[in-house]
Amino acid sequence: MKRLFVASATVVAAGILAVLFLWPRANAGPEPIAYGREACAQCRMLITQPGFGGEMRDHRGVLTKYDDVGCLLRAMLGKHDEMPEAWVEDHTSGELVPLLTATLIRTPGGGTPMGHGIVAFADQDAAGAFAAEHGGEAVALEDLVRDSARLARSSSAGQPRVQP
């Protein structure tokens, strides 16, 4: 009888552990941005304009949203000890794409919601066309993260926004 109880308890414990470790994580990936209802986690401005924002999910699964790629990058710089998952809005489609695969274009005059002037694209050709049309230049994510002063120099408050 005692062996049957121990065996049953072992099977139940193994089942519980399997569920805990194999169950898909609920907090994974990006989520749609509710424009006009959600605020930027960095600057606290209401997120209203598609095609400029981003999201970040930390190691605990907490998702934060940003109205400007520059706000997202500043928040990432504040996470000194971890590289969170991050996505940016493709400026052309508004779809969220992984930050690490996006092509970043810096525009003169800071024409984004918070004036950082950094716009993301999923497609490199679309990024090049946008840069040519708006006098922008491709900028590497590594350069922006490595040299936070370069990110600050790209900010120019009070400038008009780049229109899609």
Image (tube, rainbow, N blue to C red):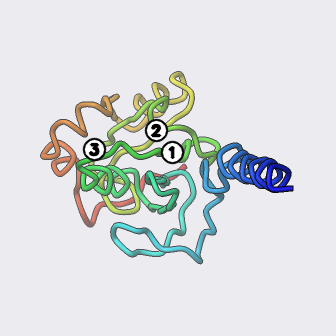
Q: Nearer the viewer, mark 2 or mark 3?
A: 2
Above-or-below relation of 75 to 151: below
- The residue that mark 3 highlights is 108
Q: Residue at x 54, y 62 (%)?
A: 49
Mark 1 element type: strand
Residue farthest to the left?
149
Tell me the CA gap for discs 2 and 3: 21 Å
Q: Earlier in the sequence, mark 3 or mark 1?
A: 1
* Neighbour tally class for label 2: few under 14, some 14-19, many 20 plus, Cα within 10 Å: many
- The residue depicted at 59 percent of the width and 77 percent of the height is 37
Q: Position of residue 18 (x, y in %)?
A: 72, 45
What's the CA distance linking mark 3 and mark 1? 23 Å
Number of marks drawn: 3
- Residue for point 24% across, 63% down: 157
Camera-near label (3 vs 1) is: 1
Q: Position of residue 89 (x, y in %)?
A: 54, 47
Please tell me whether residue 143 is drawn above or below residue 85 in the rendered image. above
- On residue 87, the disc is 1
Which residue ends up furthest to the top in the rendered image? 125
Amino acid type at circle 2 is Leu
Q: Quadrant of residue 48?
A: bottom right
Amino acid at pointer 1: Trp
Q: Is residue 24 left or right of residue 78?
A: right
Q: Which mark is residue 99?
A: 2
Residue at 31% of width from left, 29% of height from top?
140
Instruction: Assess disc 3: are there few (<14), some (14-19) or many (≥20) residues with their C-alpha within 10 Å of its C-alpha.
Output: many
Residue 31: image location, x then y, percent: 63, 56
Q: Are marks 1 and 2 in contact (CB under 8 Å)?
A: yes
Q: Amino acid at mark 3?
A: Pro
Alpha carbons under labels 1 and 2: distance apart = 5 Å
Q: Earlier in the sequence, mark 2 or mark 3?
A: 2
Judging depth in this view, the residue of 150 and 29 nearest the camera is 29
